[in-house]
Image (cartoon, rainbow, N blue to C red):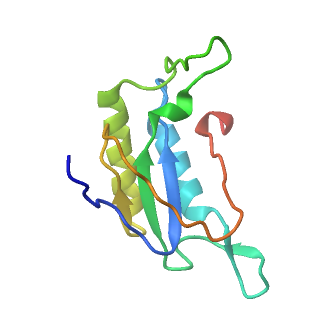
Amino acid sequence: MAEQEVGVIAKGLLVYLGVAREDGEADLAYLEKKILGLRVFEDEHERMQHHVVDVGGSVLLISQFTLFGDVRRGRRPSFTEAAEPERADTLYRTLRERLAQHVPVEAGVFRAHMDVRASVDGPVTILVDSRKAF
C-alpha cells in the first residue's frame, strides 16, 4: 500500500485516544474539556500557562486501542477493556467533531496501520484517564 499523509499539525497536541468498553458521553465531555484546557504551553517566563486555544494550536487525534493492552499476566497483551471497534469509532469521531468546534483537528485513519512521527518540543507527555475523574 502506498504511503499517504493524512494528518499534519504544527504547534499543538498529539492525542492518542483509547476508548474503553464503558466509555460514554460523560467521558467525552471530560476529555474535551481537559484537552482544550490543559495549560502545557509556555509563556514568556517559560512557565506552562497557556492551553492549545491560547496559542492558536491544533490537535492531531489518533485512535489507539493498544493503550488498553494489559500485560499483568502472561507475555501477550490482553485488550479486553478496549471498546468494540464500531463503538470506539463512533466515540472517536464524536470527540473529533467536538474538538473541531474550538481548534483545527487532524486525525489518523481508524483501524489502519499508521506511521506516526512526532517532533516533541519539551518534556511534556501526560496521561489523561477519564475513569479517574469520576
Q: Quadrant of residue 73?
A: top right
| Residue 106 as seen in the image, left or right of residue 17 | left
The residue positioned 29% from the left and 61% from the top of the image is 5
The residue positioned 77% from the left and 80% from the top of the image is 46
Q: Quadrant of the C terminus?
A: top right
Percent x, y of residue 77: 55, 20
Q: Quadrant of residue 71?
A: top right
The answer to whether residue 125 is above or below residue 128 is: below
The residue positioned 79% from the left and 85% from the top of the image is 45
Q: Between 77 and 87, which is closer to the camera in this rendering?
A: 77
The answer to whether residue 56 is above or below residue 128 is: below
Percent x, y of residue 105: 38, 63
Q: Between 29 and 122, which is closer to the camera in this rendering?
A: 122
Percent x, y of residue 76: 55, 17
Most extreme residue toward the top is: 74
Most extreme residue toward the left is: 1
Callout count: 0
The residue positioned 30% from the left and 47% from the top of the image is 109
Most extreme residue toward the bottom is: 44
Percent x, y of residue 128: 63, 46
The answer to whether residue 38 is above or below residue 94 is: below
| Residue 131 as seen in the image, left or right of residue 12 | right
